[in-house]
Image: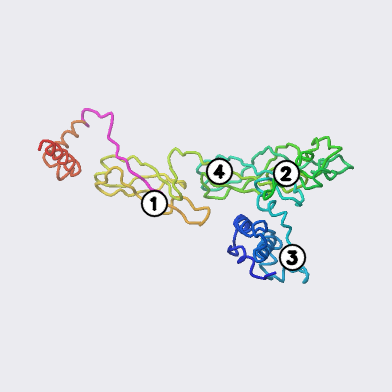
Amino acid sequence: MSKRDYYEVLGVAKGASERDIKKAYKKLAMKYHPDRAQGDKSLEDKFKEVQEAYEILSDERKRAAYDQYGHAGVDPNRGGGGFGGGGADFGDIFGDVFGDIFGGGRGRQSRARQGADLRYNLEMSLEEAVRGKEVEIRVPTLVECEVCHGSGAKKGSSPTTCPTCKGNGQVQMRQGFFAVQQTCPTCSGKGKIISDPCSPCRGQGRVEKTKTLSVKVPPGVDTGDRIRLTGEGEAGEQGAPAGDLYVQVHVRDHSIFTRDGNNLYCEVPLGFTTAALGGEIQVPTLDGKVKLKITPETQTGKMFRLRGKGVKSVRSGAVGDLMCKVVIETPVNLSSKQKELLEEFEASINGQSAKHRPKEKGFFDGVKQFFDDLKS
């Protein structure tokens, strides 16, 4: 048996994920399978090499030993507790390659299923999301039965091995090149039969319960962020590990601020006198009011930046800015005297629009040119 690097054999990087390793294995196993080799010894040797590499890299414990000590770490003759030795069982290849399609491999012991992951939708205000908060949530879920401790059997008894599938949970039918796996009809894929079920959980090993959990929400979270609580999902079957709980954050709309990443945005109404002459106004932030200096001749829509008044990133720690968009407000409910003053002001700039209102003049000049072009 060749002792090439296992990662090289499968054609994956050392840091490859479990999914990438399995995908590479499937491809190579189909390529070198003995049913296609037709007596080609070299292909059979390559198949064994691929099979050996996959058995090591698909096992978390063996892979860790191999990464640290190389082949010596998985050599059973050196006490490494590694590769199981012996030739590959060619009949099992379809269980390994197509297990995710047909439900499992022949000769593989049935595994109790891990509990399902759960999701909890958590609504928060913008202030709570920015500052962080510890909240209590109530989650309905399935927990391990305290009477049978997850076995599903009545106290004093235990499940027995299924006689149909011999504990595999699967029965197999082979037709030439293909092998089709089916869930065992006797034990429903569990590999065991409970003759005397536990009364409180009715043989399921799990009971419904509403758990109260404390969740620490870090400062800076935003809509779409998830907080993972390991092992707080549904309990697994027959004592298998529980799933995880994912707390999905949703930040409610704010009456003043809009958030985009780490920046906050708000619109600030501005009187036209202050916009024309300049001055100081007070604007809101999440930490209170601050003064903002308005430059003379400010136009509506201008954006002012207040650095460091945004949100602190939950990932990098960088702090965003507050962007204030000024919207010039036209006075309403004017008295007769105020109207006269405005008319007097308008008369004072009459005929000088190019100087005092360049955008207005530019717009109407463009409109005039537009209609002139239509006539020509």
**Rendered image: mark on residue 306:** 1
Q: Quadrant of residue 149?
A: top right
Q: Which residues are magenta?
A: 321-338
Mark 1 or mark 4: which comes first in sequence?
4
Residue 281 shown left or right of residue 104 in the figure: left
Task: Say which of marks 4 and 3 sits in front.
Answer: 3
Residue 248 drawn at (x, y percent): 57, 43
C-alpha separation, residue under disc 4 versus residue under disc 2: 24 Å
Q: Earlier in the sequence, mark 1 or mark 3?
A: 3
Disc 3 on helix, strand or loop?
loop
Task: Please state if 93 lies on the left or on the right of 302 as rendered.
Answer: right
Compared across the picture, whether 28 is left or right of 252 comes to: right
Q: Are marks 1 and 4 in contact (CB under 8 Å)?
A: no
Q: Is residue 214 magenta?
A: no
Q: Are marks 4 and 3 in contact (CB under 8 Å)?
A: no
Mark 1 vs mark 4, CA separation in Å = 27 Å
- Give above or below for 93 relative to 129: below
Q: Which residue is mark 4?
A: 249
Identify which residue, 117 or 326, lies in the foreground: 117
Say whether residue 3 is left or right of residue 292: right
Is residue 330 a member of the stretch shown in magenta? Answer: yes
Residue located 46% across and 46% down the image: 286
Tag 3: residue type?
Gly
Q: Residues within 10 Å of mark 3 (few under 14, many from 20)?
A: many
Spatial CA distance of label 2 from label 3 is 31 Å
**Disc 2, SS:** loop
Which residue is nearer to you in this view: 376 or 99?
A: 99
Query: Which label number is shown at residue 82?
Result: 3
Residue 235, which numbered label? 2
Q: Are marks 1 and 3 in contact (CB under 8 Å)?
A: no
* Residue 268 to residue 315: above or below: above
